[in-house]
Amino acid sequence: MSVVSLQDKINAAGGNPLEMMRQSQVGAYIFPLEPEFTNWRDEQRSWRETAVLFDQSHHMTDLYVEGPDTLRLLSDLGVNSLGNFVPNRAKQFVACNYDGQMIGDCICFYLEPNKVLLIGRPTVQNWVEFHAKTGGYDVTTLKDVRNVENQGRRLTFRFQVQGPNAAEILERVNDGPLPLIKFFHMGEITIAGHKVRALKHGMSGEPGLELWGPSELYAEVRNALMEAGKDLGLKAAGGRAYATSMLENGWIPSPMPAIYSGEAMKAYREYLPARGFEAMASLGGSFVSDRIEDYYLTPWDMGYGNFVKFDHDFIGRSALEELAQRRHRKKVTLVWRDEDVVSVLASQFQKDPAMRGKYLEWPASNYSTLPYDRVMDDRDRIVGLSTYSGYNANLGEWVSLAMLDEESAVIGSQVTLIWGEEHGGTSKPVVERHTQMAIRATVAPAPYNATALGAYREAIGQAAAR
């Protein structure tokens, strides 16, 4: 049987997308840059203590949409209101399926009238591109895929400079005071004699700007930034540190795309390629269900409930109107109990490999594209899901992002997550034989960062309300 689409691949797996993803041979999401430029501990500390340069030029998919129907297309697909969306603004764009379950989220840049740029992991971009091509919209699209798919040929560079010293570094390269740019607004600054666009935004929750321009200026701009920050403690973050930045800002990078079931989504599954992100993604962790719908998430699960606006018609609206009346899980941070983490680490010295806990990779312990661990209360009931996890040198703690039932999401509450997979693990090459181990955890806010919990978090709420 010829397997060319996601639907073909599901059919080849006996119609079971969960088994397809559990046995996928792909590991965690790849950040194709140097793992470390100094060491990941100092690189993590730099975004809190001095300044960090995040290089986002390589790992995200960019989709340009241009034409008279650009905003109509976005309005038809996104839960967000576009009523006040104008050029030089950006939004965290959220798309759902017909049942109100999330396909994903990304950042949408309004570059100029009737032209936007969608950036992030490829799930939303693929969904928008499908409708742009099949929905009769007067738009054109241009996709600039991540480096692991395009052998490194990108249209733009993209850097973030963040931390307490970020403003001074950016003023140095700009040869003067920075323009006043509001949160999720865009402006311009000068670097090495070149005008580059700037967005007020931050991955680590610290102050700074996101900068981008033509890829041919990549080295010149990067060198100018690093030189300007040399005596101010600026460090370039490698892939290992970058993969943990969401643990402080509370952003869950990749929910399970709610596309693998339902007749309404079949045409889309037939459109997606058999070697695309959605078809290759791996599912890992201790949460196991026979229903793929149990892995789907709503905007409220992800902390995006305030993004949902019923001032326009869009795919999933009627379902979300009903869901809005229900109780929802709440996004939190789980702070893992030190001694239980140590027990997992100590178990690596068991002589019998089957008695060792699933290895905790430092600093990011995600080993699959879609991590789903079950979280239990003191009565051994499943009360939520734990996702991305890792060690943070700023905190001196192992933490994870999670979604818990309301009664268990109380700050300071105690829960237990189960680390490792059932039956000794699946066939993924990143999964060694192991035994599941319980890790006690304390519920903390998400984001788990003093800056993000303050003014940064307030700005996110204000931007979402517009």
Image: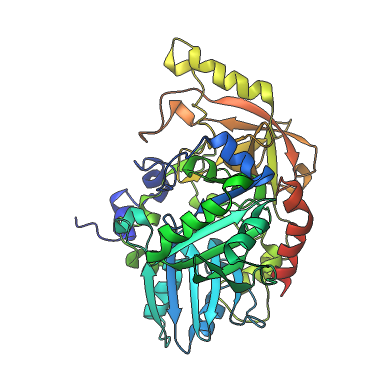
Instruction: Name the residue: 49% across, 40% down.
Output: 240
| Quadrant where the image shows the N terminus | bottom left
In screen coordinates, is 14 left or right of 295?
Answer: left
**Is 330 rendered above or below residue 371?**
below
Depth order, front residue of 357/462: 462
Depth order, front residue of 359/403: 359
Instruction: Name the residue: 45% across, 46% down.
Output: 369
Depth order, front residue of 177/27: 177
Residue 408 place in picture, x, y as percent: 75, 42
**Is 243 rendered above or below residue 215?**
above
Count how many numbered circles sit on residues in the image. Answer: 0
Q: In terms of image quadrants, where is residue 155?
A: bottom left
**Is 111 rendered above or below residue 412?**
below
Instruction: Name the residue: 44% across, 18% down.
Output: 354
In screen coordinates, is 410 left or right of 352?
Answer: right
**Is 85 rendered above or below residue 34?**
below
Question: Is residue 389 visible in the rendered structure shown here?
Answer: no
Question: Is residue 160 visible in the rendered structure shown here?
Answer: yes
Residue 279 place in picture, x, y as percent: 36, 54
| Quadrant where the image shows the C terminus | bottom right
According to the image, what is the colour scheme of the structure? rainbow
Residue 380 place in picture, x, y as percent: 68, 31
Q: Residue furthest top?
A: 351
Residue 204 place in picture, x, y as percent: 63, 50
Q: Residue furthest left?
A: 1
